[in-house]
Image (cartoon, coloured by chain):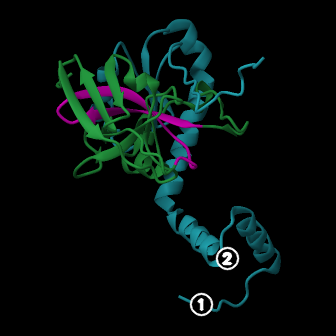
Amino acid sequence: MDVLVRGIDSEVYAKLKARASELGLKIGEALTDAIKTWMNKSPEKNEREREQDLNIATFRRMRRFLEKNHRGNWVLIAKGEVVKLADSLEEIIEAKKNEGLTGRPSLVFKVGETEVRRTLGLNTGRKTK
Amino acid sequence: MIEKTWNYSTPPVSNVPAPYIEIVVYNPERSLKYPSKGTLNAMIDTGFDGYLITPINIFNELKLDDYEIPQELIETTEIFTGERMKLRTSLAIVEIPGLLQKQIEIDTHKNCQEPLLGRLFLEKLITTLDGLKRKITVTSQSDVSK
């Protein structure tokens, strides 16, 4: 559909136009995308993001201590706290349910062992002759 | 030993048929699944060394940030163009209905267009590609309930 909108900031519009052009999008497509993103930023989502940030801060604060004292244990961080240390992931899942944390953002990992390294397609890190 | 066979399909970005298998993805508590009905086609990609990478909408629908691995434990991934990408990784369960269920690490990235199953997923499975018949067969030795 076509919509006429008045009062758009010229600088913001110029940036939108440039970005859309970079991505090969029409202005309408870029604007629709931007509106969707804005619509998704509900207060509930912001609360969730705050909780995620809190969990990350707790991970950073506790990482050394966990690696020194609890290597090999599974850890559940939620609500900005270390909620559970366990021998198995199953125990972590149970604890998350029992503590009423289902649906709350959490960090889960095995201390000193969880490490994600991925290659997608050919890896440029490899030297060729 | 149990086995399943699927016909190749044509990927959205190529004219060359590729091996796809049907899967269902669950969150670790098994309270959410994707898709909610039926199965999802995932392409086998041996150039990817993870378990499963999916578009971000699947990651979000399964609320996988409930079981996310800290970003500091995820190395930046470099693809063949030299572009560096930071993946998000969580825990999940993948099922090939009637064949196996597996606890996995699931990756996502905003540029991921379709689900890809990588080499870690294929470990402990026998996967046969029949280019003549354009069929893929996966054989599992493990019990489906595990």
Bin the neighbour count of mark 1 within 10 Å (Cα to Cα): few under 14, some 14-19, many 20 and up. Answer: few
Mark closer to the chain start, 2 or 1: 1
In three-dimensional space, the C-alpha distance between marks 2 and 1, rounded to whole angstroms, equals 12 Å
Q: Which residue is mark 1?
A: A3
Above or below, A43 against A94 in this view is below
Amino acid on which the number 1 mark rests in the picture: Val
Q: Tag on residue B6?
A: none
Above or below, B98 against A109 in this view is below
Question: Tag 2, which chain?
Answer: A
Q: Nearer the viewer, mark 2 or mark 1?
A: 2
Instruction: Determine whether the residue tagged by mark 2 lies in a helix, strand or loop.
Output: helix
- The quadrant holding residue B141 is top left
Question: What hue represents chain A?
Answer: cyan
Q: Is residue B32 left or right of residue B43?
A: left
Residue B106 drawn at (x, y percent): 44, 34
Residue B73 drawn at (x, y percent): 58, 25
Bin the neighbour count of mark 2 within 10 Å (Cα to Cα): few under 14, some 14-19, many 20 and up. Answer: some
Query: Residue at the spot x=22%, y=50% of the render?
Result: B38
Amino acid on which the number 2 mark rests in the picture: Ile
Residue stretch rendered in magenta on the structure: B87-112
Query: Residue at the spot x=50%, y=63% of the render?
Result: A42
The residue sitting at the front extreme is B132
Q: Tag on residue A27?
A: 2
Residue B67 drawn at (x, y percent): 42, 34
